[in-house]
Image (cartoon, rainbow, N blue to C red):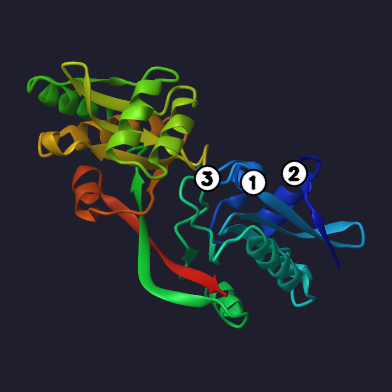
Amino acid sequence: MRIAELTQAELTAATAVLAAACAYDRAAEVAAEKLFGPGPTTPIPRALGAWDGERLVGVAAVAGRWLRVLAVMPDARVRGAGSALLAEAERHARAVGAPRLRALDEPGNYLAPGIDTRNGEAIAWLARRGWQRGDEVRANCLLAVRGNPRVTAARAATAAARVRALGYEVRRAEVDEVALVEAARAEFGGAWPFELARALAARPVGVHVALREDAYCAFAAHDGNNRGLGWFGPTGTWPAHRGQGLGEALLLACLVDVAVEHERCEVAWIGPRPFYDKVAGVVEDREFAVMTRNW
């Protein structure tokens, strides 16, 4: 088994590995983003491959203190490829000064908020190698967006009209609307500005905003992370403007966008689940375990 750097020239083979290995995440569809794409604080991830002879059988990517992805072809497991990839990822994280390594949940460029709890095999595999499972359980929810009577252009227009009557302007963000990114950075910080910038680069732009007197009051985005999967987020409302219906109006605008390409929209790292259930109806929930390797 040979472990070496993985290059973008090998993306097709890497995508095939992810398609065969990842039963709970649509990793193959975002292979380039996870293996080679930047994060807000980790512009150059390290992508690794495991070769059995000339055949690529496993891939991994490590970015700072995050293990973005690790996957091995099912017919190549129990032969050391996964352990070798994990060991090299851990070695790299130590070498760059990371105090620990976490699985999948790099803010701004994450495959998922953790490991899907249905994937008990992966959770147990990591635990045998010194990884610890945290007490926190994170959740995503899935919303039906195509054929859902609660997700229609007419309903989105009605919600927008209600907030316009309160003095708000509601619109799709402009291409490269840098002022929005900077406003979100000042108010919310974290990885949201990075994801917003990515959503602004989508075509059509995957961000809707609410303003009053030319000041940002709320925003909602889709396809800022996991581009092409129809994921929703981030979304935020400035404190002085909460409770006015802005979140509903902007969520519906995004869901109508997502419905053009997808049957469902996945809302990641959810906080107020009842809000999403009220607006669109939650059709499925996913839960994730947080796995960490300390040293």
> From this viewpoint, is residue 223 visible?
no
The residue where tag 1 is placed is: 31
Residue placed most toward the observer, 284 or 105:
105
Quarter of the picture holding the N terminus: bottom right
Residue placed most toward the observer, 115 or 215:
215
Residues packed near mark 3 inside 10 Å, few (<14), some (14 to 19) or many (20 plus): few
Quarter of the picture holding the C terminus: bottom right
Specify the label residue 54 is tagged with.
none
Question: Going by the image, does 245 lie left or right of 253?
Answer: left
- Residue visible at 44% across and 69% down? 289
Badge 2 amino acid: Leu
- Residue visible at 71% across and 51% down? 47
Extreme residue toward the front, this view:
97
Tally of marks: 3
The residue where tag 2 is placed is: 11
Badge 3 amino acid: Thr
Specify the label residue 41 is tagged with.
3
Residues packed near mark 1 inside 10 Å, few (<14), some (14 to 19) or many (20 plus): many
User: Residue 288 lies in what quarter of the image?
Assistant: bottom left
